[in-house]
Amino acid sequence: MAKVTFDTDRCKGCGLCVAACPKGIVSLAHERINAKGYHPAEVVDMDKCVGCASCARMCPDCVITVER
Ligand code: SF4
Ligand code: SF4
């Protein structure tokens, strides 16, 4: 199974990764705020991740790492 990790405090909450995920499992964590003051991106259902790395490729700040 793929593993997606976020360097959370570098996320600027732009949502590009949310739009890029074909499985619709990336979202912004509205209940959390990171060191920059943004709602950071997270994967809400890792079991559905197919490891395509679209999210990581889309992120302008290289916040996301996908391992498979
Ligand atoms: S690797 Fe692909 S399926 Fe998994 S969270 Fe990223 S965009 Fe979605
Ligand atoms: S694309 Fe990168 S900076 Fe933008 S919300 Fe996703 S992880 Fe954060």
Image (cartoon, rainbow, N blue to C red):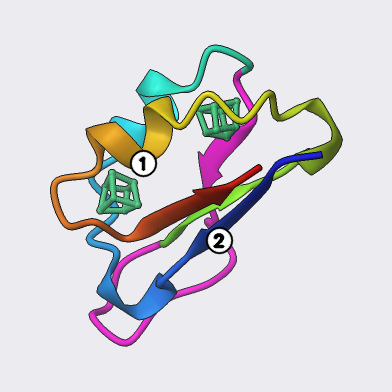
**Callout 2 crowding tier (Cα within 10 Å): few <14, some 14–19, many ≥20:** some
Secondary structure at numbered mark 2 = strand
Tell me residue 14's x, y (percent): 23, 45
Query: In the rendered structure, does residue 11 fall within the stretch colored magenta?
Result: no
Q: Give SS at disc 1.
A: helix
- Dot 2 or dot 1, earlier in sequence: 2
For the point 55% across and 36% down, which residue is it? Answer: 26
Q: Which residue, given by chain and number where applicable, does mark 2 sit on? A: 5
Three-letter code, disc 2: Thr
**Between residues 65 and 22, which one lies in front from this camera angle?**
65
Confirm or reject: label 2 Cβ below 8 Å from ligand 2.
no
Q: In this rendering, would 7 be left or right of 22? A: left
Q: Quick one: 32 or 26, which is closer to the camera?
A: 26
CA distance for labels 2 and 1: 10 Å
The spot of residue 66 in percent (x, y) is 52, 47
User: Outermost residue, top direction?
Assistant: 22
Where are the magenta residues, as a range? Answer: 24-39
Q: Which residue is mark 1?
A: 56
Q: Does mark 1 have its CB less than 8 Å from ligand 1?
A: yes
